[in-house]
Image (tube, rainbow, N blue to C red):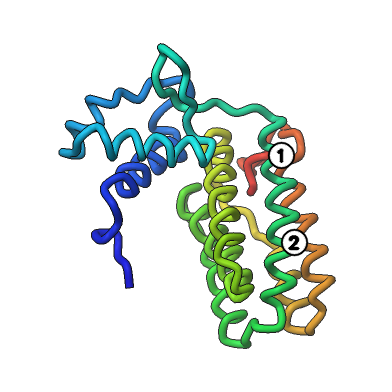
């Protein structure tokens, strides 16, 4: 089995940079200097350029002639686009995964969702939320589809962190419980309908949060 140490240098660099961009440690528009990054990771410019291409394919950076590589910005339209794409693709994955979901797997998904409800910060909540979504669709047996969904989740996380980096109170996610209830009952179409609504809601126009609850666009 491949481990992080076995990954090509370019993949390790792109993963590290992606984590910084998604967490908001590197601001939109910031220039990524090839020589500085090569020095930081003890690499030549070749894997750094390949890492930039990987990040560009994820929509995290943009390459501009004579201006180099910069961290990509994003708009509300992009938030909505990602939500629509996630809804369509995760529904497809869940339909394929549904017949293969075991009782043990659904119990694990419930435990993950409850852990998210107890999250002390936005990063912990996002990790639990992503793990829940990933777990219930993994049995679809479609690796290319899962990789695409992973990229979309990274974009969702970036929107989330940009909109909710100060005060945080983890929401109780009733949609997750409704999805699990439908899956346990063998009602896959009901589960996919709840899932689609749940994801599309994250692409709605954000409203001013009240009582320290995250905005609509923040809860992905």
**Residue 81: mark:** 1
Front residue of this view, candidates 64 and 158: 64
Q: Nearer the viewer, residue 173 or 52?
A: 52
Residue 204 in percent (x, y) is at 76, 39
SS at circle 2: helix
176 vs 143, nearest the viewer: 143
- Residue neighbourhood size for the residue with mark 1, other residues' Cα within 10 Å, grouped as few (<14), some (14–19), many (≥20): some
From the top left corner, tell me how far across and down residue 4 is, in percent: 29, 59
Say whether residue 167 is visible.
no
- Identify the residue shown where x is 83% and y is 72%: 189
Tell whether 56 sits left or right of 195.
left
Q: Position of residue 88 (x, y in %)?
A: 75, 55
Q: Which quadrant is the N terminus positioned in?
A: bottom left
State left or right for residue 204 relative to residue 132. Answer: right
Question: Above or below — where is 61 with respect to 123?
Answer: above
Res 195 label: 2
Q: Quadrant of residue 81?
A: top right
């Amino acid at each position: 089995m491949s481990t992080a140490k076995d990954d090509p240098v370019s993949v390790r660099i792109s993963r590290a940079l992606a984590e910084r961009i998604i967490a908001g440690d590197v601001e939109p528009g910031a220039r990524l200097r090839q020589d500085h990054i090569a020095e930081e990771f003890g690499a030549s410019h070749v894997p750094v350029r390949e890492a930039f291409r990987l990040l560009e394919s994820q929509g995290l950076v943009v390459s501009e002639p004579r201006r180099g590589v910069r961290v990509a910005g994003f708009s509300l339209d992009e938030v909505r686009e990602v939500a629509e794409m996630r809804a369509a693709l995760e529904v497809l994955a869940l339909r394929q995964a549904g017949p293969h979901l075991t009782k043990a797997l659904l119990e694990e998904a419930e435990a993950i969702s409850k852990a998210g409800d107890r999250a002390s910060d936005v990063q912990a909540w996002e990790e639990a939320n992503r793990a829940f979504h990933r777990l219930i669709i993994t049995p679809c047996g479609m690796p290319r589809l899962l990789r695409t969904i992973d990229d979309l989740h990274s974009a969702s996380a970036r929107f989330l962190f940009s909109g909710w980096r100060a005060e945080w109170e983890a929401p109780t996610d009733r949609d997750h419980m409704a999805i699990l209830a439908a899956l346990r009952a063998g009602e896959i179409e009901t589960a996919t309908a709840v899932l689609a609504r749940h994801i599309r809601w994250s692409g709605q126009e954000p409203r001013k949060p009240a009582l320290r609850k995250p905005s609509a666009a923040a809860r992905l």
